[in-house]
Image (cartoon, rainbow, N blue to C red):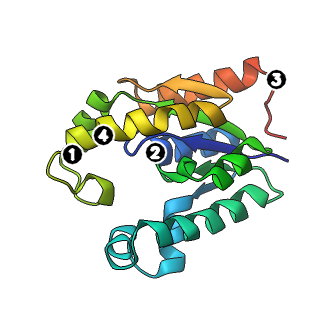
């Protein structure tokens, strides 16, 4: 039974939309970053600073593989960089339904300009960093996504409705 996986850049709404979507579909919600922090015993930011991105991506792959392999359907929010590893893209193409929550770098900057918890944005030019992340990752999100939802400025309930409508039109409800 495939799960529904949400991918997208940091701040695109994966966790927020994912929680609401899981409630709407009456399935569990799993946030891979939250699961990873539980395993690490510290924040992703602390781990990133201490161990580096490569080690973080190794552990991120383990967590994603466990979540995707679960037999019970669920909504899963991935970390924004999960698609960087080919092994993760293979996992995502191998069974779950994947929804890309597409946000422009400008929209993300509007949402994240005061956020101090995202390690990849703790740089001199975070807006420029968002643009480069978008350029690097947008093709990878599109590679794994079955559905692309433009996030723009709709409310969370509107985004949930947009995802549910796409799933329903594709004959994928209930999740199976």
Query: Residue at image x 43%, y 38%?
Result: 136
Query: How much space separates mark 2 and mark 1, taking CA atoms?
Result: 22 Å
Instruction: List the residue tagged with mark 1.
Output: 126
Query: Residue at image x 26%, y 52%?
Result: 121
Instruction: Compare marks 3 and 1 and give the one earlier in the sequence.
Output: 1
As drawn, the label of residue 130 is 4
Contact, mark 1 vs mark 4 (Cβ under 8 Å): yes
The residue carrying pointer 1 sits among few (fewer than 14), some (14 to 19) or many (20 or more) residues within 10 Å by Cα, namely some
Query: How much space separates mark 3 and mark 1, taking CA atoms?
Result: 40 Å
Instruction: List the residue tagged with mark 3.
Output: 171
Out of 122 and 98, give the one closest to the viewer. 122
Please name which of the two marks, 2 or 1, marks the residue nearer to the observer: 1
Please name which of the two marks, 4 or 2, marks the residue nearer to the observer: 4
Query: How much space separates mark 3 and mark 4, taking CA atoms?
Result: 35 Å
Q: In this image, 58 relative to 158: left or right?
A: right
Q: Report if residue 81 is visible in the image.
A: yes
């Amino acid at each position: 039974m495939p799960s529904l996986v949400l991918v997208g850049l940091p701040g695109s709404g994966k966790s927020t939309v994912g929680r609401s979507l899981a409630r709407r579909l009456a399935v569990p919600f799993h946030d891979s970053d939250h699961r990873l922090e539980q395993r690490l015993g510290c924040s992703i930011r602390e781990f990133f600073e201490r161990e580096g991105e490569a080690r973080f991506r190794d552990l991120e792959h383990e967590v994603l593989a466990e979540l995707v392999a679960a037999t019970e359907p669920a909504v899963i929010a991935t970390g924004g960089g999960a698609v960087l590893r080919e092994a993760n893209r293979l996992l995502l193409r191998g069974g779950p339904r994947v929804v890309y929550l597409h946000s422009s770098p400008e929209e993300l900057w509007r949402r994240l300009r005061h956020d101090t918890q995202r390690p990849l944005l703790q740089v001199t030019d975070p807006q420029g960093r968002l643009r480069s992340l978008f350029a690097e990752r947008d093709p990878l999100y599109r590679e794994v996504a079955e559905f692309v939802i433009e996030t723009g400025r709709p409310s969370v309930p509107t985004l949930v409705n947009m995802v549910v409508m796409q799933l329903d039109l594709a004959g994928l409800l209930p999740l199976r």
